Image: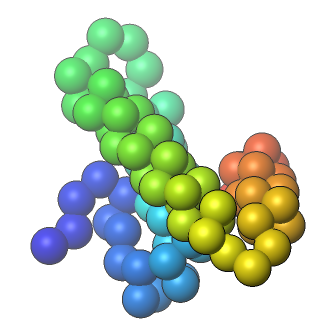
């Protein structure tokens, strides 16, 4: 089952997949400006996915490099 962010860890690797899911959820939230319950749910999902990605990164061989990669990709819109 896919929900906010259409997260599929096998598609991108666990940490990167969570980051991609966070980006997708954040984009969903941004596409619904104003006081919208669906936008709030998407924003909460983005936060959860990004939190999990950072937790996964902390377990990596080089957590600093993984966290820098996550923050860099999120900071430039995922590019």
Q: Would residue 70 appear left or right of 34 to someone viewing this image? A: right
Q: Image point 29% across, 53% down: which residue?
A: 4
72 or 30, nearer to the observer: 72
Residue 28 appears in the figure: no
Q: Would residue 36 appear left or right of 74 to someone viewing this image? A: left
Residue 52 appears in the figure: yes
Q: Image point 55% across, 66% down: which residue?
A: 56
Viewport quadrant of the C terminus = bottom right
On screen, 43 above or below 37? Answer: below
Q: Image point 64% across, 65% down: which residue?
A: 57
In the displayed orientation, state which residue is furthest to the left: 1
Viewport quadrant of the N terminus = bottom left
On screen, 6 above or below 36? Answer: below
User: Where does the image place residue 39, in percent across and percent down from the top left?
Assistant: 33, 29
Q: Image point 36% across, 78% down: which residue?
A: 8
* Applied colour scheme: rainbow
In the displayed orientation, state which residue is furthest to the bottom: 10
User: Where does the image place residue 68, in percent across and percent down from the top left?
Assistant: 83, 57
On screen, 30 above or below 23? Answer: above
Q: Would residue 35 appear left or right of 65 to someone viewing this image? A: left
User: Where does the image place residue 31, in percent across and percent down from the top left?
Assistant: 44, 35
In the displayed orientation, state which residue is furthest to the top: 35
55 or 5, nearer to the observer: 55
On screen, 11 above or below 30? Answer: below
Residue 40, quarter of the rendered image: top left
Residue 37, quarter of the rendered image: top left
């Amino acid at each position: 089952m896919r929900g906010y962010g259409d997260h599929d860890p096998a598609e991108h690797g666990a940490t990167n997949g969570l980051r991609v899911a966070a980006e997708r959820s954040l984009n969903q939230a941004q596409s619904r400006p104003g006081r919208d319950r669906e936008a709030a749910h998407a924003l909460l999902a983005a936060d959860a996915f990004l939190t999990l990605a950072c937790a996964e990164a902390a377990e990596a061989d080089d957590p600093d490099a993984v966290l820098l990669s996550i923050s860099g990709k999120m900071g430039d819109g995922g590019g």
